[in-house]
Amino acid sequence: MEIREDINTTLAGQIKGAISWPGNGFWGPSAVQRAIDAGGNRLCRPLIITDAGAWRAASSVVLAALTTNAIQDWQVFDGVVSNPSLVPVHGALRMARENTCDSIIAVGGGSAIDVAKVVFGCLCSGLEPEELATLQGREWLDAAAAPGDPVLLAIPTTSGTGSESSSAALIQDENGRKRLYRSLRTRPSLVALEPALTLTLPFQPTAQGGFDALLHALGAWINADNNPIGKAMAIQALHMCMHALPLVLDKPGCLAARADMQMGAYLAGVAIGISKVDAVHAMCTPLESVVDMAHAEALAPVFRVVSRYTAQTHAGVYANAARHLNIAGTGDDHRDALSLIGRVEDLARQANISLHLSNLQLTKQQAGQLATQALQSASMPLNPRNLTHEEVSSLYLQMVN
Ligand SMILES: [Fe+2]
């Protein structure tokens, strides 16, 4: 694929700005400083929730901004791991309570931000992490943010999950199942998108995160939700992700491409917070609960099978995306839809993400159990093609063949 970095780069690395919805977002050079300045005296005693690698990469920038604001009483919890369970949630929450922290700063990828969201929910509500999943916790999570709620500042160091702008947090329960906490109240109220912090991200997390963001954008664009703001965010995110992903893979040191990828992931997070996704993501979460694999490694094979099946009856939604992106425009919906699906699969290959689950064996009964879980996802009814339990089971079986 030809790489051109001179087109469609809407966020050159030196351009900066701010937005006050949703929450307050800052992007570009010095975004961390500007976000911490905006937090003001609501960031007197923050707990920083991070992982060791992200903290090594970002600590100098974060600590310099805190020091400039005369904030000296911070704590650092750097025990987050990928696919986090409740263990780091408990650890960080204990540290926050013991030190009477008044705010949370999440530094890292989706795992750090997801942990921070649940810790934040517990800190504000006074509930324990297990209680947050009960009816009592649901009531708190579903309520509107209160003016006195503490600050949750997200400083992403990867471009992928969009956790910094979405309402979702995924934490594994004691049985290894991924539990989704969805709450607008725990969405970060401050976000700092400083693209320079992603420049040293290695190939694999760059590739896998970028592919995840791309499928968030595509899922929110093609699904049956009709919120015009969600759709506007989704198509812009799709433009940016399709353009920036091959660039950041080919030229990882290109700040403008990193900035576009970061903004694409952020906008995709906003889009899925409004419009949710489609059957691809709905079918991924149960799969990830039974197989130890990265999110993107589950997404790609599911996409290969589910998008083609959906396009059999609803080619128009994919064709529409293909035309918006100038990927195809033959006027034949099915042909244009397949062009788009093919382009996404090309990106998976460039990202070194397999489109096949060759090492997985699934019985009919296991596929049925996965289908039962997938059908509980709020995104499943939004898939353009309505899928029955039998069809979802069959699609799982097709993936492993
Ligand atoms: Fe995702």
Image (cartoon, helix red, strand yellow):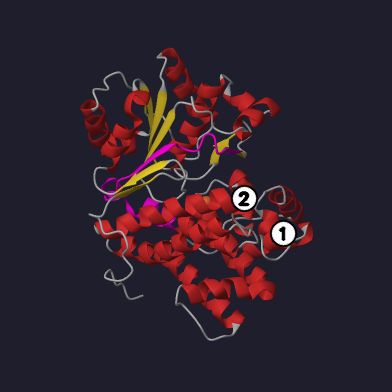
Q: Along the horizontal axis of the image, is 76 left or right of 401?
A: left
Please tell me which residue is depicted at 57% across the width and 67% down the height of the picture.
304
Dot 1 amino acid type? Val
Image coords of residue 375 (percent x, y): 72, 51
Element class at badge 2: helix
134 above or below 293? above
Q: Is residue 203 magenta?
A: yes
Q: Which residue lies under the disc numbered 1?
A: 392
Q: Is residue 301 magenta?
A: no
Please tell me which residue is depicted at 41% across the width and 44% down the height of the picture.
20
User: Which numbered disc, 2 or 1, marks the residue that appears first in the sequence?
Assistant: 2
371 above or below 41? below
216 above or below 102? below
Disc number for residue 366 = none
| Residue 164 picture quarter | top left
| Residue 361 picture quarter | bottom right
- Relative depth, front residue between 10 and 229: 229
Q: CA distance from mark 2 to mark 1?
A: 12 Å
Element class at badge 1: helix
Q: Nearer the viewer, mark 2 or mark 1?
A: 1
Dot 2 amino acid type? Leu
Can the viewer see residue 395 in this picture? Answer: yes
Image coords of residue 205 (percent x, y): 39, 51
Q: Which residue lies under the disc numbered 2?
A: 287
User: Which segment is the magenta one?
Assistant: 181-210
Q: Residues within 10 Å of mark 1 (few under 14, many from 20)?
A: many
- Relative depth, front residue between 170 and 163: 163
Query: Is the CB–ligand 1 distance for label 1 below 8 Å?
Result: no
Image coords of residue 222 (percent x, y): 59, 65
Q: Residues within 10 Å of mark 2 (few under 14, many from 20)?
A: many
